[in-house]
Image: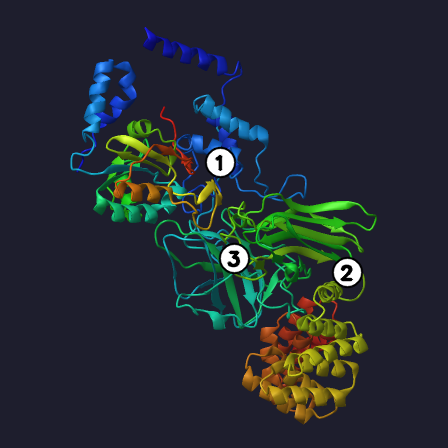
Amino acid sequence: MMWTLIPVLAWLAATALAPQSTAAPVTFNRQIAPLIYQACSSCHRPGEAAPFPLLNYEDVRKHAAQIVAVTRSRYMPPWLPEPGYGDFAGERRLTDAQLQLFADWLRDGCQEGNPTDLPPAPRYTPGWQLGPPDLVVQIPKPYRLVASGTDVFRNFIVPVDVQETKYVRAIEMRPGNKRIVHHANILIDRRRTLRSRDGEDGQPGFPGILTTTEARSDIFDPDSHFLFWKPGSILEPEPQDMAWRLDPGSDLVLNMHLRPSGKEEVVQPDVGFYFTTRPPTRHPMLLQLEHDGAIDIKPGAVDFAVEDHLKLPLGVSVLAIYPHAHYLGKQMEAWATLPDGTRRWLIKIPDWDINWQAVYDYRAPVSLPKGTDISMRITYDNSDSNPRNPNHPPKHVRSGPRSEDEMGHVWLQVLPAKETEEDPRVILQEAAMRRRLEKYPDDFVAHCNLGQLLVTRKQYSEALAYFHIALRQNPESVTARTGLGAAYLAEGRYDDALRELKEALRHDPDHVNARLNLARALGEKGDLDGAVRELERVLKIRPDNTEAHIGLGLGYFSLHRYAEALPHFQEAARRRPEDADIQTNLGLLLAMHGDLAGAIQAFQAALKVNPQDKTARGYLERAQAMAGQH
Amino acid sequence: MGFIRAGSFKSYQEAGALSMFTFLAFMMLWQSNLLSPHGEKALVLLFIRSDCPVSNRYAPDLQRAYERYSMKGVDFRLIYPEAGLSTTAMEEHRKEYGYSIPAVLDADHHYVKEAGVRMTPEVAVFVRGRLVYRGRIDDRYVAIGKERPSPLHHDLEEVLAAVAAGKPLSFRETAAVGCVIEKLE
């Protein structure tokens, strides 16, 4: 008798717990499919990063309990930002009510429902998302990832062979093996400084987490676009007027986060470039909030904080944000304090997870007026209660590129407002460099950069002062001495410029920038032969140097050596098709050589870049008139 | 091999429905090596799922444990509790991840019920028919998506070392983290 009682009790318990609902059961076709299509399928489909497809009823039913578990814990879909602290495009967060639908569906027995309720399945483009790219590059040798162990952060060098400056409207990375590539950050190494580390441990690439290629020395051509890949990313081309420049002689650096899968895997990503002929007319800029120098986290610390801020010298529109820390990072916040004291949140991530780091694009640009203070605060947990802590027992941690070091960065992509004739990027960079010197008073690179920026802003005496400080810190520095020489040159102190530039070249005869400036200084002094001689030496060191070609074209032209000027202008025009002055000069030279058709073409090219160019228009009309007479 | 006797497992759960005499008889059979006719000290059931990234990441660890302890009298079985998985697909997965452990397709969740597991990966260790351990392989995963760079406790390894050394074990259970084993329809 006893045995028969148990099922009855169980039945009673089950009926008592069942929800008293008369509503129609949740079905796949009506409620679940739209959620899956919107939040899951872009990664959960064949060839993508997720471990199994979620494209139809059968796929989803087979994983129903798992879906309920991982959505309830908000592990899936992965979305770190707290709602209400920044409005981001492509938000993948599900609402509590949506999570409940999954749970109810499982409870109701995973019914498929009425076929007429099923929305159309999403369509995905196979292969390259924007069609065949204009250029495809690949890491030269495949990388073999071990079957198990901790995650691997690796930088792969990919040489890009373009013969002339290109404008990039989109770049697509295809990891080749999406299951193990957790994310990738693509950097442009314009000076190929990192390739010396390639293969240092016998495998392609080198280890570490990189977010920049060098200490912000390319200040006049700042990296200005986030080239970030994560699984399921939808590839969006840059706006038409915001392409970015790719120069000959650059390397791509793919900083990749790889996760061992349980079997040995091979990775050999390729990257496709889509070019445009339109040079950018809007120039965004990346602003970095950081204070890595203050990262000094004692073992056991549970709430170590790093802060930074920057006061904006002009108005900006914030387009995107990229917060970054490693395994100890806990909470990340970035906000703007407007001049009237109100606070606007830029982002808040309550539980940082490096595995799901991402660039977040704002749904609409966030306008911040001049005088706004942008701030970040990142906290770290270096105790044993942080399971992600790379060290057990915890160790003293400082900043660094290894995954067991820490970082604390918030990068903002901004479009600065043009308030004067000056390039607003220069003004913004100056503010960033001055802030950098507040944080790091002995920073050599910041002194050099600030010197260079102030030369651009024609504030020569202050610029000279920064270069002198830099040279006191590092008397042998050719970069600082060249900067000093260039500052004298810009100010019109040619003898001082010649002295410093010659001294710089004594230390490093192959320093291209020093020699270009020496040529300019000689030209200013009226020594055209000397200038031409120096530029020819530059071309011996760097045959593809566009500046040298332009200088030689002008130099030989002024020396009336037209036949020698022509090939340099042709080369310069090929490399800088968007430079109207070069085209106009080329046209003049061609006309002088009797090539009227070529001249007309060059003048037309100049007018295409700048239709208001009166000089080019005048020459074009004359050339056309002359061609008509013949 | 192929000695796993479904009947002997089943009796454990259904004992309540049998007479006390039959139950005791089963218990005695159990104690007398019914599960280990070849003299194995223990049987380890490794529940994995072909498309579970967590259990896949453990493949090298499980294979290492097999290579180490099958020499010491421990028997291993990979159990795939996947309804709808074909034997061919199972064998392909086993090969792909470098397993040489014999595998069983548990489409009707027979072994799932016997071992009382809920996740993949989850392990169940039987010594002479008695369940002595059920749960995680190690504590690398704290929750799904939250993992240590390397485990602090190697639970399965500790149990196997004790078994190999012939130490007496009382039942221990830990919470496994991974992919929920889906209910059958």
N-terminal of the two: label 2 or label 1?
Answer: 1
Q: Which of A382 and A160 is in front in this view?
A: A382
Determine the secondary structure under disc 3.
loop
Q: Few, some or many C-alpha atoms within 10 Å of disc 1 (few <14, some 14-19, many ≥20)?
A: many
Q: What element carries label 1?
A: helix
Residues at marks 2 and 1, common chain? yes
Task: Please tell me whether mark 3 or mark 2 is closer to you in this view.
Answer: 3
Q: Which amino acid does label 1 sit on?
A: Val
Three-letter code for the amino acid on which mark 2 is drawn: Lys
User: Looking at the image, which residue is at 19% across and 31% down?
Assistant: B33
Q: Mark 2 near mark 1, Cβ–Cβ under 8 Å?
A: no
Q: Nearer the viewer, residue A606 or A359?
A: A359
Q: Which amino acid does label 3 sit on?
A: Glu
**Mark with earlier residue (3, 2):** 3
Mark 2 secondary-structure assignment: loop
From the top left corner, tell me how far across and down residue A319 is, in percent: 67, 52
State which quarter of the image contains the N terminus of chain A.
Answer: top left
Measure how far apart labels 3 and 2 are at the Cα level. Answer: 42 Å
Mark 3 crowdedness (10 Å alpha carbons): few <14, some 14-19, many ≥20: some
Comes first in the chain, label 3 or label 1: 1
When asked about the image quadrant of residue A550, the answer is bottom right
Question: Is A425 left or right of A549, judged from the image as shown?
Answer: right
The residue that label 3 is drawn on is A404
Mark 2 closeness class: few <14, some 14–19, many ≥20 residues within 10 Å: few
Q: Which numbered disc covers residue A70?
A: 1
Most foreground residue, A570 or A616: A570
Label 1 resides on the chain identified as: A
- Residue A505 figure quarter: bottom right
Q: Answer whether labels 3 and 2 touch (C-beta < 8 Å).
A: no
- Residue A588 is situated, as x and y percent measured from the top left of the image, at 67, 81
Residue B149, above or below A538: above
> Which residue is under mark 2?
A418
